[in-house]
Amino acid sequence: MFEKLDPKDLQENVFSLIGERWMLITAGTGEGCNTMTASWGGLGVLWGRPVATVYIRPQRYTLEFVEREDRFTLCFFGEQYRQALALCGSKSGRDVDKVKECGFTIETENGAPYFQEADLVLVCRKAYWQDMDPAHFLDGEIDGKWYPQKDYHRIFIGEIETVLKQK
């Protein structure tokens, strides 16, 4: 059972939440969605609003869903779901029904799909997007190390509209 929180009431460490525990970026509808694992992202304040920033490579199937919909969700799970998150990061939704494979239960909030098994859910309304431009890398090692295929991320900033946390 989830309770709604104000984003200011979150106590989690953002660096471990995203970088170590990972998250699922999900978009679509309750009837059809796609999800992907991410360990890059951010939470903060921009334009006077609580926001989440996510990065999606162009070949990811989830990108089509995030581009099409007004909202996306970020779901964070306990360690018992690590294998499911690994599957969602290594398989494409074009080839596998990841939701079914992981045994996740889809719920919706403001029309955006999330998973009942998550510990924490952020429902985000898209506010901005931009493609990463390698001409702006100030650290010369980033391009060669992280983008040998030149598949630069699309950046999305979403206003955090709703925070759901398991009781």
Image: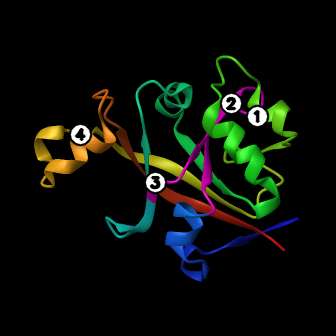
- 100 sits left or right of 6 in the view: right
Q: Secondary structure at mark 4?
A: helix
Q: Which disc number belongs to residue 144?
A: 4
Image height check: is 20 above or below 149? Answer: below
Q: In this view of the protein, can residue 52 be seen by the observer?
A: no
Marks 1 & 2, CB-CB < 8 Å contact: yes
Q: Secondary structure at mark 1?
A: loop
Q: In this view of the protein, can residue 156 be seen by the observer?
A: yes
Give the spatial CA distance, label 3 vs label 4: 18 Å
Where residue 8 appears, as percent x and y from the top left, is 54, 80
Give the spatial CA distance, label 3 vs label 1: 25 Å
The residue that label 2 is drawn on is 33
The residue that label 3 is drawn on is 40
Image height check: is 108 above or below 13? Answer: above
Give the spatial CA distance, label 3 vs label 2: 21 Å
Marks 4 & 1, CB-CB < 8 Å contact: no
Residue 29 shown in magenta: yes
Give the spatial CA distance, label 1 vs label 2: 7 Å
Q: Please state which of the two labelled residues, at mark 3 or mark 2, is closer to the viewer.
A: 3
Q: Amino acid at mark 1?
A: Gly
- 148 sits left or right of 139 in the view: right
Where residue 87 appears, as percent x and y from the top left, is 71, 38
The magenta-colored residue range is 21-41
Q: Nearer the viewer, residue 126 or 42?
A: 42
Q: Please state which of the two labelled residues, at mark 2 or mark 4, is closer to the viewer.
A: 4
Where residue 152 appears, as percent x and y from the top left, is 31, 34
The residue that label 1 is drawn on is 30
Q: Please state which of the two labelled residues, at mark 1 or mark 2, is closer to the viewer.
A: 2
- State the residue at coordinates (15%, 55%): 139
Residue 149 shown in magenta: no
> How many numbered marks appear?
4
